[in-house]
Image (cartoon, helix red, strand yellow):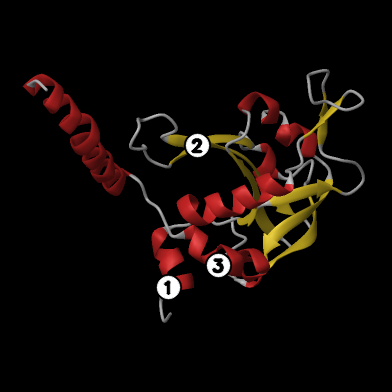
Amino acid sequence: MNKQFIGWIIGVFILFPLFVLLYNKITVRKNDGEKYFKDFFDAIATVKLSIPKDDPYYLSKDYIGFDHYRRGASAIGFKGMSGNIISVRFRDSLLKKYFIVSVYDVNDQLYSPLASVMYGTKILAWVNQDDLKNPSYGTKEKPIPVFNFRGVNEPIRITSESEGSVNGYESLEPTDQQYKHNVLTYLTYIMPKEEFKKRFEDGK
């Protein structure tokens, strides 16, 4: 076994994983979402919301949001270092609170019409009840997260002839798997570390 091959083994199996570990520690903000997932998930309930047609806050924004979150590299490479976020912000006219519908790691092209499809509709929204009762949530700066949704009068969907469409429509409503992924991703990568610590870890 020559020295070059030994050097390659050391680099691939020892140095690179150590580099990845250090890189993730420095660059990735990550909570222990799995540990507190059940407590948070069990506190989620549905509420009926109205997404307005003429709310200045809604209209003055690029109201379909495209963003990314950093989830880090793996020991086998840098593929999948970030995930995508599609979001719609609005103010519900009855509760007088601001909400943000977010779906994570979905097809950007499929979900790009989400805001225009939801515009002026009523939805059943899955939200955490502690967030709903917390007066610090529901503001423009801190909208209440919506993890799952269903159209009240008709499904949230788009016309489509692509594979997977049904009767000329493709649903944008999250599956149960996507819903749980939205919750876990929010807890793990999106909720600020300080808030996560105060909410789940302090006094435990």
Residue sitting nearer the eye, 114 or 196? 196
- Residue at horizontal 45%, vertical 65%? 195
Residue sitting nearer the eye, 111 or 10? 10
The count of marks equals 3
Direction left: furthest residue: 3
* Residue tagged 1: 201
Identify the amino acid type marked 3: Ser
Identify the amino acid type marked 2: Gly
* Residue tagged 3: 136
In the image, taking residue 24 as reference, residue 117 lies left or right, namely right
Direction top: furthest residue: 161
* Residue tagged 2: 83
Secondary structure of the residue carrying tag 3 is: loop
Secondary structure of the residue carrying tag 1 is: helix
How far is mark 3 from mark 2, CA to CA? 27 Å
Residue 9 disc label: none
Quadrant where the C terminus is found in the figure: bottom left
| Mark 3 surroundings: few (<14), some (14-19) or many (≥20) residues within 10 A | few
Direction bottom: furthest residue: 203
- Of the two numbered discs 3 and 1 on the same chain, state the one appearing first in sequence: 3
In the image, taking residue 78 as reference, residue 123 lies left or right, namely right
Q: Is residue 60 visible?
A: yes
- Of the two numbered discs 3 and 2 on the same chain, state the one appearing first in sequence: 2
How far is mark 2 from mark 1, CA to CA? 26 Å
Tell me which corner region of the image, top left, top right, bottom left or bottom right, holds residue 155: top right
- Residue at horizontal 20%, vertical 38%? 14
How far is mark 3 from mark 1, CA to CA? 19 Å
x then y, percent, for residue 190 = 49, 51
